[in-house]
Image (tube, rainbow, N blue to C red):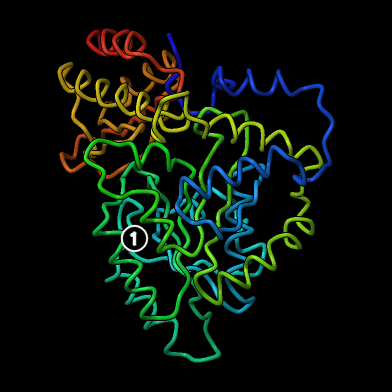
Amino acid sequence: MRQFRNDYSEGAAPEILDALFRTNAQQTPGYGEDEFCAAAADLIRATCGQPDAFVKFIPGGTAANILAISALTDEFEGPVLAADAHPTIHETGAIEGTGRRLLATRDPFGILTPQEAERVWRVMTSGGCHTTRPGMIYFSNTTEFGHAYTQAEFDALCDWAQSHDLAVYVDGARMASALTSPGCDLTLEHLAARADAFTLGGTKAGMLFGEALVVNPRSNRAKRAIDRIPYLTKRAGLLNAKGRLMGVQYQAAFTAPTGGGTMDAPYWRYAAQSNACAAALASGLQDAGFELYLDVTGNQQFVWATREQAARFAEACGAETMVAEDPTGADRVVVRFVTSWATCMDDCEELIEFARTL
């Protein structure tokens, strides 16, 4: 049975591998100073509708978060983010390692809200120089629990941040899934116009590795970040000598086929396919008698299961188990299933048929 553990277990989408193969023998300058990175950056700027945006290709998601947060803030500042945000639970103190303190809200499921951000702001500014000063807000799209922000939710966060002179950073490790999810009314163009910085994840979107860090020079914080990022990248050991490999992949991912529109590019097409498979899987698991933990539309799906069922799922398809408070008191756990660019409907149907036997 195909694995549903994560969305980066496979290698790369065919268009990506083909581009890497075709350009393999070409010689280019190192460290991303090559024609492929330049062309990929131009494609991203055009897709975002931000011709002046700064684009930097970073090997991984945690590295991109380290660079963005440390570039957008001072040493005595930190990001306001949800308690279940990726840096607070899955990055092993990487952000704190830069001297920035994480300022977590009490928002559930990783969904940052202006109300909780305001509470944290008041607490952290009440002590003057004795407390860490908020310098930005961080949220991922989709969130750790698969929520895709609506335009209204996104604008409310941007409005709140702007009123407090804070930078806005969106971790887009699964941005492709978020913006192609059913019912999503938030566009990349709108997001890029309001956020100071964001990433367009490649690792979880059909590439071998790589994240595109995009900074819009819309504010003083963003302009300063653009100046700082190259130095911070080198100091952190994240400047890839063969940076052209990320440029090749992003150029292929954001190039639409002849006659196709922007959303026909592999980056978006595979994400929509992954989301469709996840939706079919969620529906099938419900039909098989499993209760959804959350109603989400991206490529992550979560269901309640007994511990025995969870162990069987893990053995069969690698699905991960999460501990959550069971409102029924039955001591159930949550099982997470993740689809990828390579998942097809037959894979989902096989898993659904297996679920019917549990």
Where in the figure is residue 277, as x and y percent of width and height?
Answer: 31, 21
Image coordinates for residue 113, horizontal then vertical, percent = 30, 64
Secondary structure found at label 1: loop
> Considering only vertical position in the picture, is 193 above or below 296?
below
Please identify the quadrant where the N terminus is shown.
Answer: top left
Residue 74 spot, x, y in % from top left: 62, 76
Q: Pinpoint residue 28: horizontal percent, then vertical percent.
A: 82, 36
Residue at (79% x, 45% y) in the render: 31
| Crowd class of label 1 (few under 14; some 14 to 19; many from 20; radius 10 Å) | many
Nearer to the camera, 292 or 252: 252
Left or right: residue 67 compared with residue 289 = right
Between 233 and 212, the residue placed more toward the observer is 212
- Which residue occupies 39% across, 49% down? 188
Q: Say left or right for 48 vs 330.
A: right
Q: Residue at x 59, y 60 (%)?
A: 68
Against 281, residue 145 (above or below) is: below
Disc 1 target residue: 112
Tag count: 1
| Residue 176 occupies quadrant | top left
Give 284 or 307, whichever is nearer the viewer: 284
Side (left or right) of 328 relative to 218? left
Q: Looking at the rendering, in which quadrant would you find the C terminus?
A: top left
Residue 145 sits in which quadrant? top left
- Amino acid type, label 1: Leu
Q: Is residue 18 above or below residue 79?
A: above
Residue 166 occupies quadrant: bottom left
Q: Does 293 sit above or below residue 230?
A: above
Which residue is rendered at x = 61% and y = 40% of the image? 40
Q: Nearer the viewer, residue 99 or 165?
A: 165
